[in-house]
Image: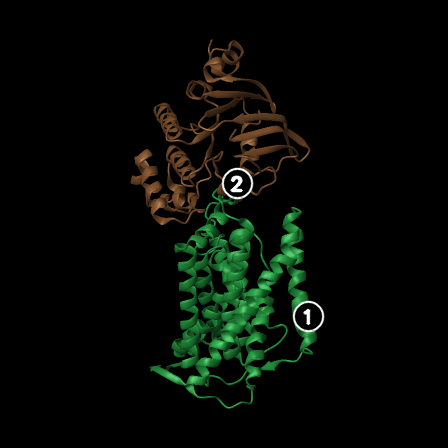
Chain colours: A green, B brown
Amino acid sequence: MNFSGLIQDFGPLTIAGLTQGAIIALFALGYTLVYGVLRLINFAHSEVFLVGTYACLIVWGFFGLDQNSATPGMGAVIGYLLIGLVAAILISGVTALAVEVVAYRPLRRRNAPPLAFLITAIGASLFISEVVGVLTHRNQRGVPNLIRPTDVLVIGNMHITNLQILIIGLALVSMFALDQFINRSRLGRGIRAVAQNPDAAALMGVNKSRVIMLVFLVGGLMAGIAAVMYDLKIGVTRFDAGFILGIEAFTAAVLGGIGNLRGALLGGLLLGLVQVYAASLLGSEWLRAAAFIILVLILLFRPTGLLGESLGRARA
Amino acid sequence: MLLELRDITLLYGRIQALHGISLNVAEGEIVALIGANGAGKSTTMRAISGLRPIAQGSIHFDGEEITKMRADLRVVRGVSQSPEGRGVFPGMTVRENLEMGAYTRRNRSEINEDMERAFTLFPRLKEREKQVGGTLSGGEQQMLAVGRALMSRPKLLLLDEPSMGLAPMLIQQIFDIIVEINQQGTTVLLVEQNAQQALSRAHRAYVLETGRIVKQGTGQELLHDPAVKDAYLGVA
């Protein structure tokens, strides 16, 4: 146990954990949104994220950018980032919609039991991942150096980079926008209505199919943003990039209270922090195990997660 | 006829819940469905609002066949239901619940007008405006469900047990309000355990037994029918 290391590096570790946590949190939203409305764990969400990590790379490739390109000027970087975000958001959103329409909707029409949805979810996840694997010959793909991490803020031994600020900032802005959409807009109210009482929502004139498509789409958009940030942070992606991170995002959603948007944020940030603290304390090989030990401990005391379920609070 | 059910049957799995129900509601009427628990009253309501598909028969509303129409589209046509168990959204405030009632409408000033009307009909809801539905008392939830059903400006208002769980004084009040709503131009079809109140307020009524209509007539006729008195009015 390396306590002195943890204490000494507490500041830098915290920033690293929050950065990782921000990506996990955005990723987790897709699980929590779909669960809130359908009581379904959409395991294919990890591949919705995966295609996003490739979408921006492919688009950047059109502009001749690859892992060996020199970092462009500031203006160009902002342009490329926006284009990459739009591409990832679009492709992830469309993939999420396709999974709903192709895989889940036919089951719903036939009133299939929950197990059928579960195995379909796993099947859809494997299918997309394998298709990406075949198309990329299972090679990893490097990310252009759009942002060279440089310290922009130094507090004691805490060096905060431009990339960390971008990731945390973008995640918070996206979460805030989503929160406003769900809680203030008419469509957001429709989503909450279906989550809380699907029959009563239909009696209000809410088209359930449309709400379901909307939550898949919105979850996909958020995963697309997470995918671009992941690319920039990690520097490579691969056909199985969604798998482990997907499990972590799912864990974060459960940790915060599945079905609860703010819970996903809290769970994601907490998970990111726990991982880096544990890695520092016990060695990096414990990074993944620590997250699950925390999950089990928290669920022992709060079975519905830290914040409980709110999207479909006390569903009738 | 505003609403016409022709010979509808409905199945819950293998159990047949409705055995050929035919009934109609004319514009401007209050029509009551009375009967014992399990007679099929709520099931009939669910068939009309579209929450449950029917096996046979047809449903016509306002000159159009709606037999297979989705529930949310029936709301757009002018059918609105306050469901059994009230169906209040527990995590939304009273105001948000009422907003949900106006989900299919866009005209903001009209929606605000109707919101004020709901608050005038049910002053209690105004006091609870910012409270979430799950924390309301049973009576308040009932008022909210009825107020919310009005928010779509329906042609036909379906009320499933509006007096359920209410104190006797409130029962009088809610029926007064139903009559008032009707006099303002909304047609009402209601299901009631409280047959006394329902029959004395309704223009016409149907009596259901085990998924069949066994009797119909004006409210007054049924109120004085010996068999109805015996079975549903609890008169010794």
Circle 2/circle 1 CB separation < 8 Å: no
The answer to whether residue B226 is above or below residue B213 is above
Relative height, residue B55 to residue A62 (above, below): above
Where is residue A79 shown, x and y percent of the image?
46, 80
In the image, A316 versus B118, the foreground residue is B118
Compared across the picture, whether A168 is left or right of B213 comes to left
Q: Nearer the viewer, residue B49 or A284?
A: B49
Q: CA distance from mark 2 to mark 1?
A: 44 Å
Q: Quadrant of residue A52?
A: bottom right
- Residue A139's quadrant in the figure? bottom right
Give neighbour class at mark 2: few <14, some 14-19, many 20+ (Cα, 10 Å).
Answer: many
**Residue B85 vertical placement versus A226 (above, below):** above
Quarter location, residue B208: top right
Percent of width and height locating residue A271: 48, 66
Amino acid type of the residue that numbered disc 2 sits on in the rendered structure: Arg
Which chain does tag 1 point to?
A
- At label 1, the amino acid type is Glu
- The residue depicted at 65 percent of the width and 58 percent of the height is A102
Q: Is residue A149 visible?
A: no
Q: Which mark is residue A130?
A: 1
| Of marks 2 and 1, the one in the foreground | 2
- In the depicted view, which residue is nearer to us: A6 or A43? A43
Q: Does mark 1 fall on the same chain as mark 2? A: no
Residue at the spot of label 2: B74
Chain bearing mark 2: B
Locate residue B86, reporting x and y percent.
45, 36
Mark 2 secondary-structure assignment = helix
- Mark 1, Cα crowd under 10 Å, few <14 / some 14-19 / many 20+, is some
Q: What label does residue A239 carry, if any?
A: none
